[in-house]
Image: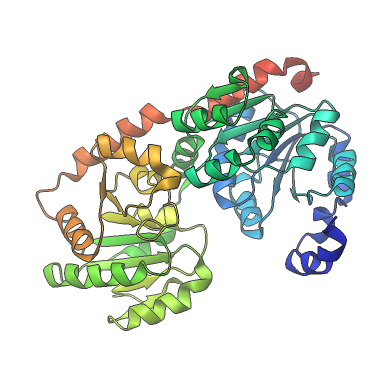
Amino acid sequence: MAYPALYPWLAWKYREGLAERRGFYPANVTQLGRLKPFWIHAVSVGEVQSALPFVSAMRNGGYGGPVLLSTITSTGKTMARQEMDSLVDAHVYYPWDVPRVVDRALDALSPRIYTVMETEIWPNLLLELEKRDIPAYMVNARFSEKSFIRAMNNRAFWSRILSTFRRIFARSEEDEARIRAMGVDPSRLCRVGDSKVDALMERKRNVDGSKLAAVMGGKGPVFVAGSTHPGEEETVLEAFAVVRRALPESRLVLAPRHPERAGEVLSLALQRGEACLLSKWAPGWTILVVDRIGILFDLYGHSDAAFVGGSLVPKGGQNLLEPLAWGVPVFHGPHMEDFHDLAGLAHRAGLARLIEGVENLASAWIGSACPEFDTASFGRRCEVFLAGIGGASSKTWEEIASDNKKLLWE
């Protein structure tokens, strides 16, 4: 009911792809709709990365039909074009969850199956898919503690909406338990692991290491602080100052979670000494502030140790798997609510370490760069760890394909 009043604001905020968000599509998409595509929704960058190994598993599994990918953010679209252009047939912006927009979108797109990556739930679309008897699946499903508590305050509603999914593929035992507690029939639940493991290994295989070789070349260890938030950069910079006293040739890459904050972060860094933006780097840099998206994973591959942000401040943490995929020691703060299970597994394997402030972080970085640290052994342990928790994408595709043999190959 609020849609007419909100429309001017929505039209301004989402002016990129506005027609598609309203359910109006170009000719190539409506033509694809006549072929009944397999629709995969991945809201932004992280979800697109999770979708990559899933689509690869589809193609490797013999599915040659049309695939439609949707995102909500422009950064998600950029990542999709960068990573998945050869695997999908078209990209669209996701339709607004307003009944008449949903009807228009589904009439045009006519998907044979709908799959959402992680926990992106739009009730009107899901209810309409159910009404039209179009199978819906949730892949790599996760509910943070905060989201779970909110959902339980309206359990009947969430139970009804989640029941629209034919199957929900949970990321972890904890996620599975939370979804069950929300009223989902256990027969619809399947725990397969974290698709992001497969996504990272796929990305690692495709990384062109030469792109950053010139930037990252030089003497001394490199420490990366990734996906940092306000309140964390100050701690990182203070810790790095301590590290420099012990390791004068060390360097720091500081990557704010939101690259538009790069100027602000650069100003903080310049108070500590020499610093520059990645887009304006010069040989001999000491502190490099990242002002580009989609490059942090590659930077971890050039580092000696990492700090994962969103964890010293209450933001739920970020993905520890990115540095671990490169065999890089990883440190994080106490706020890892969104990655609680993964952090626990990494700690038990001796691959991650909790830090709580400047001195902790400085000593952790210094220790990871000392001659006694066995880098090769640590890397092998990371490989074993990741192999043990991978494979979720293939398992998920096998289950969906088994459920829909006629739909997929008719």
Is residue 63 placed above or below 88 in the rendered structure?
Answer: above
* Structure colour scheme: rainbow
Is residue 168 placed above or below 280 in the rendered structure?
Answer: above
Write down the quadrant of residue 215 in the picture: bottom left
Q: How many marks?
A: 0
Residue placed most toward the observer, 170 or 323 = 170
Residue placed most toward the observer, 101 or 294 = 101
- Horizontally, residue 350 falls left or right of residue 337, namely left
- Horizontally, residue 356 falls left or right of residue 248, namely right
Q: Is residue 336 visible?
A: yes
Q: In the image, residue 47 lies at what x, y percent? A: 58, 45
Q: Is residue 111 visible?
A: no
Task: Name, please, the residue furthest toward the left.
Answer: 372
Picture residue at 32% right of the left edge, 38% below the top: 344
Write down the quadrant of residue 303 in the picture: bottom left
Query: Looking at the figure, which quarter contains the C terminus?
Result: top right
Q: In the image, residue 81 lies at what x, y percent? A: 65, 51
Q: In the image, residue 110 lies at what x, y percent? A: 85, 35
Picture residue at 83% right of the left edge, 32% below the top: 36
Write down the quadrant of residue 140 in the picture: top right
Query: Looking at the figure, which quarter contains the N terminus?
Result: bottom right
Q: In the image, residue 123 lies at what x, y percent? A: 74, 41
Picture residue at 45% right of the left edge, 37% below the top: 197
- Horizontally, residue 310 falls left or right of residue 93, namely left
Residue placed most toward the observer, 158 or 73 = 158
